[in-house]
């Protein structure tokens, strides 16, 4: 049974109640990530999303209809048909903070890849003069168009009508773990952004638990990334371990440099079973580099990180419980682990 909604619940109480994580153990991060870390917090817009979700959950009837539709189509299409894809990643002020945009700056273009129904994209809308959004689901693409976005229904940027266009910013929020070929997706993001001044904004759920959604359920992707996950039995799958591995083993070899990194909860609208669903997200602002090789400074930083990790192991047990608070919320998104 869901707890009674208290619309006066404080931000601290909401964070504790749902295990919403914004803080990190910086001493566990790679030195270059420590410098790039941007602290975000539960702000007013995020609080409004949480309280609205708690007050207006999806009913058991709507959830049953969605489950019935998923026998014949993907979760995304079912959500698009029923308008049940309401999620939250960043507020407008958080977008501005992590991108370091001036308050009156709105002349940039954004490509949002895998934009869902556009609810998450709307928070970035005040910051950009034009937003193009892509979706592989036709139902969700209709939702994007209805919200006024330039909507492109495609699952492959290379063969889409916008394959030759370049954008000031390219965002891809919580899609990398839902595609068969994540490395190709990263390369497509890089080729879509203006270089060298453009930026890629990436959101990834950690620990990394990839699954490709389809009719009747989900399956493992055809390509696996070397990042600790919730399904591999690894003991080194804290948020900090995972972000270090993602950057060191995937993003830097693919030609990206981390400009900023933050930790935020990835929120999904509640239902009759739970007032709010939450996962642990990493937000990265990336710059494309001239080549796909890490430079000498990165190698030095890697060595520093190794020694620093050994010195900081004593601190881990005290911080472990706080770091893993969100694990109980994973069942809604992480279907392969059920």
Image: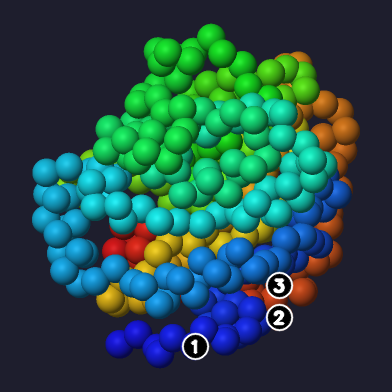
Query: Mark 2: which secondary structure?
Result: helix
Q: Which residue is mark 1?
A: 6
Query: Mark 1: which secondary structure?
Result: loop
> On the image, which quarter does residue 42 sit in?
bottom right
Residue 245 horizontal/vertical position (percent): 63, 46
* Relative to 223, 260 lies left or right: right
Residue 327 horizontal/vertical position (percent): 48, 70
Q: Which residue is mark 3?
A: 316
Q: Which residue is mark 2?
A: 318
Q: Residue at x 45, y 71 (%)?
A: 52
Query: Mark 3: which secondary structure?
Result: helix
Q: CA distance from mark 3 to mark 2?
A: 5 Å
Q: CA distance from mark 1 to mark 2?
A: 31 Å
Q: CA distance from mark 3 to mark 1?
A: 34 Å
Q: Along the line of sight, which residue is nearer the eye, 197 or 206?
A: 197
Q: Residue at x 48, y 24 (%)?
A: 184
């Amino acid at each position: 049974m869901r707890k009674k909604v208290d619309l006066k619940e404080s931000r601290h109480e909401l964070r504790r109640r749902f295990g919403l994580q914004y803080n990190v153990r910086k001493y566990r991060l790679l030195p270059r990530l420590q410098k790039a870390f941007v602290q975000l917090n539960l702000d007013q817009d995020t609080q409004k999303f949480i309280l609205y979700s708690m007050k207006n959950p999806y009913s058991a009837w709507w959830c049953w209809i969605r489950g019935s539709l998923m026998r014949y189509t993907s979760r995304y299409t079912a959500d698009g048909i029923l308008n049940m894809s309401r999620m939250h990643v960043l507020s407008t002020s958080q977008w501005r903070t992590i991108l370091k945009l001036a308050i009156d700056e709105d002349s940039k273009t954004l490509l949002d890849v895998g934009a869902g129904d556009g609810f998450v994209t709307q928070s970035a809308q005040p910051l950009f003069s034009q937003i193009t959004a892509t979706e592989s689901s036709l139902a969700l693409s209709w939702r994007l168009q209805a919200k006024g976005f330039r909507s492109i229904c495609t699952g492959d940027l290379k063969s889409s009508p916008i394959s030759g266009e370049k954008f000031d910013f390219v965002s891809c929020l919580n899609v990398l773990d839902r595609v068969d070929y994540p490395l190709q997706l990263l390369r497509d993001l890089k080729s879509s952004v203006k270089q060298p001044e453009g930026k890629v904004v990436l959101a990834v759920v950690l620990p990394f638990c990839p699954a490709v959604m389809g009719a009747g359920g989900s399956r493992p992707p055809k390509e696996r990334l070397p990042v600790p996950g919730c399904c591999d039995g690894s003991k080194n799958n804290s948020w900090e371990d995972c972000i270090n591995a993602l950057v060191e083993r995937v993003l830097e070899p693919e030609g990206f440099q981390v400009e900023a990194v933050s930790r935020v909860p990835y929120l999904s609208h509640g239902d009759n079973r739970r007032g709010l669903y939450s996962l642990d997200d990493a937000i990265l602002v990336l710059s494309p580099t001239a080549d796909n090789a890490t430079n000498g400074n990165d190698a030095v930083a890697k060595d520093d990180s190794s020694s620093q990790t050994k010195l900081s192991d004593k601190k881990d047990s005290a911080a472990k419980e706080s770091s893993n608070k969100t694990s109980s919320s994973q069942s809604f998104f992480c279907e392969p682990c059920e």
